Image (cartoon, rainbow, N blue to C red):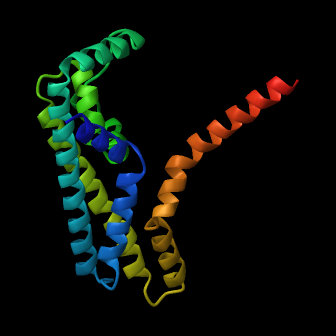
Amino acid sequence: MLVAALAALMYEWSSGNETFSSLLAAYCLKGRMTVGGVLLAGGVVGAVVAVQQIVSGSVLLAGIRHLSRLFEVLTEIVQARFNGRVPSYRSLPFFARLPISFFMGASFVVTEDAIAGERLPRRSVLLSAATAGATLFMLVGVFGGAVVAARGTPFQSPAKVVLAIVSDWRVWATIILGPPLVKMAFRRLRRRWLRGS
């Protein structure tokens, strides 16, 4: 159970879910550049993302139950760090929940709610899954719709380039992994420089 819970965390908290979603969107949109095709692609991507959030959130919930003592220690540490003021996911306004659902996923929501002492984190998992699924549906619709609308206009080529960029896993990996890697590299360089001087 611990391995499954850690795998869910690593997948959702890394660029794994964004990479998978962007590749799925690109695959679903390929050759379906009509309004109906874009809506279908958005629906498929949104549904798959919602299901994967429900699965990963449920796995983490089960992991927390099996490792309750370890989680109690973690909760004490986090609550001490934030003076006991850790808000539950559902207590946050919609526009604060949106990036959490989209970028961190249901496993983060479960963790946040458990630390906040929320009694029914399953509801938050479903809310996070619905939020992320709807967000992906809208994003696929906007980008795919822009390409459809640009067809036969001077914007056709730029729209295809933008769609190719946002559906490339390397872009998401760079956005998510780039800043931490650069920060780590600068720390190492700084340490070496300080040792040398």
Quarter holding residue 23: bottom left
Residue drawn at (78%, 30%), measured in percent from left and top?
A: 192
Residue 58 in picture, x, y percent from top left: 15, 40
Quadrant where the N terminus sits is top left
Q: Is 87 displayed left or right of 189 in the figure?
A: left
Q: Is 98 displayed left or right of 183 in the figure?
A: left
Residue 154 in picture, x, y percent from top left: 54, 85
Quarter holding residue 57: top left
Quadrant where the C terminus sits is top right
Residue 61 in picture, x, y percent from top left: 17, 33
6, above or below 80, in the image: below
Q: As rendered, which of 8 and 21 lies closer to the eye?
A: 8
Q: As rendered, which of 149 and 124 lies closer to the eye?
A: 124
Q: As rendered, which of 69 and 127 lies closer to the eye?
A: 69
Residue 118 in picture, x, y percent from top left: 17, 22
Residue drawn at (41%, 78%), measured in percent from left and top?
A: 147
- Please state the total of marks drawn on the protein image: 0
100, above or below 52, in the image: above
Q: As rendered, which of 50 and 181 lies closer to the eye?
A: 181
Residue drawn at (22%, 48%), measured in percent from left and top?
A: 53
Outermost residue on the right side: it is 197
Quarter holding residue 121: top left
Residue drawn at (19%, 27%), measured in percent from left and top?
A: 64
